[in-house]
Image (cartoon, rainbow, N blue to C red):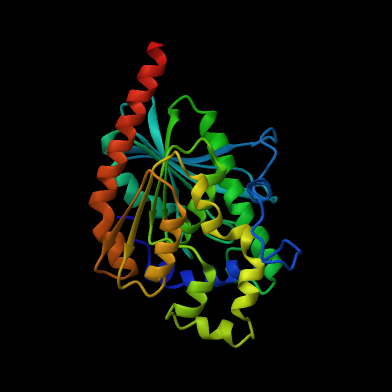
Amino acid sequence: MMIQQRTAFTGAVLCILTVALLVTSGTAGWTVPTWEELRAYYNYDATAPLNAVQTATNVTPSWEEIHFSFDAHAGGRAPGVLYLPRGQSSAPLILFLHGYKGNKENATTLARFMCPQGVAVMAIDAMLHGEREGADTAVVPADLEQVGQNIIATIIDNRRALDYAATRDDIESDRILLVGVSMGGIFGSILTAVEPRIDGAALLVAGGRWDILFQHSQYEVIEQWHDTGVKVQMLKQHLAAVEPVNFAAHITPRPLFMANGRQDRIIVPPSAQALYSAARQPKEIHWYDAGHIGTVIQAAPEMQTWISHQLSMLSQEVALQEAQ
């Protein structure tokens, strides 16, 4: 499920390497910033008006598909889509983060599975993707500082998407899970750490340690970055604010599900293991004898089981709180 176009996956390394370079703290030390410093990169004004507008609606036998947009953190509009199960007054929510060169509509596949089970799915376009302003230009601009701002803005816009969900009576704001694929899984690890409204995360073909990826990923475009003269020391020096390994421990006590491929040459296994090792319990990782795309396909049934279990546990917690 959630199978995106091949380019959405095979392009992931280009984005990953750029993230590693984007940097940004202005210091030259090797010290990892404190949690307060890391979290501050993703702070935003939650009182800023959304000015949300519903732009289109499509009804199918399984869901009501609502297209909307709201004021983005860095200016312009953030386009989104919400799939609501039909025949329900309210539903728990899965926030979906798409992969590199993907878009919000990639969430449709997830909606096909989850809406018949009474679960809503929502997604927005990442910066320079889908219907975003500038999406017809290079997804990875030459200005690395701007790339960094785009990535942080994407994570903040997903927080604002949850603000939008909170304005709707048909969404249960006390039962929210995140599903992220490839780039979406990488960003999702950071988003879950800094966003307390997310009750758990399923990250498919995601990883950490940009230096590992830079040295060991076999994707062809990596040679272009080696040719620029970038060194591993530069990556280690400048990536703290966007390094998932620095955020993973703060997902706890929310549960974490990871799925990775032993044959993945984009998110290589040591990168996936680094992210998993940095996380705390409760966590689980599922390994598949597959590459980047094959892992997503094979992981779908186990991920669906995990989602159902987590939503059931959240329902029990809500019922217990209401009874007290």
Horizontal and vertical percent position of residue 315 = 34, 26
Placement of 168 over or under 321, stated as above or below: below
Q: Is residue 228 left or right of residue 114?
A: right
Horizontal and vertical percent position of residue 206 = 42, 61
Horizontal and vertical percent position of residue 277 = 42, 57
Q: Is residue 112 left or right of residue 155?
A: left
Residue in front for this viewpoint, 209 or 48 = 209
Residue in front for this viewpoint, 233 or 62 = 233
Residue in front for this viewpoint, 305 or 39 = 39
Where on the picture, by quarter, is residue 17? bottom right
Seen as rendered, the residue at the extreme bottom is: 227
Image point (56%, 56%), residue name = 246
Where on the picture, by quarter, is residue 295? bottom left
Q: Is residue 305 left or right of residue 271?
A: left
Image quarter where the N terminus lies is: bottom left
Horizontal and vertical percent position of residue 105 = 42, 53
Residue 298 in sight from this viewpoint: yes
Seen as rendered, the residue at the extreme right is: 26
Image point (65%, 62%), residue name = 148
Q: Report the label total.
A: 0
Residue 133 in sight from this viewpoint: no
Image point (75%, 64%), residue name = 27
Image quarter where the C terminus lies is: top left
Image point (51%, 34%), residue name = 165
Seen as rendered, the residue at the extreme top is: 324
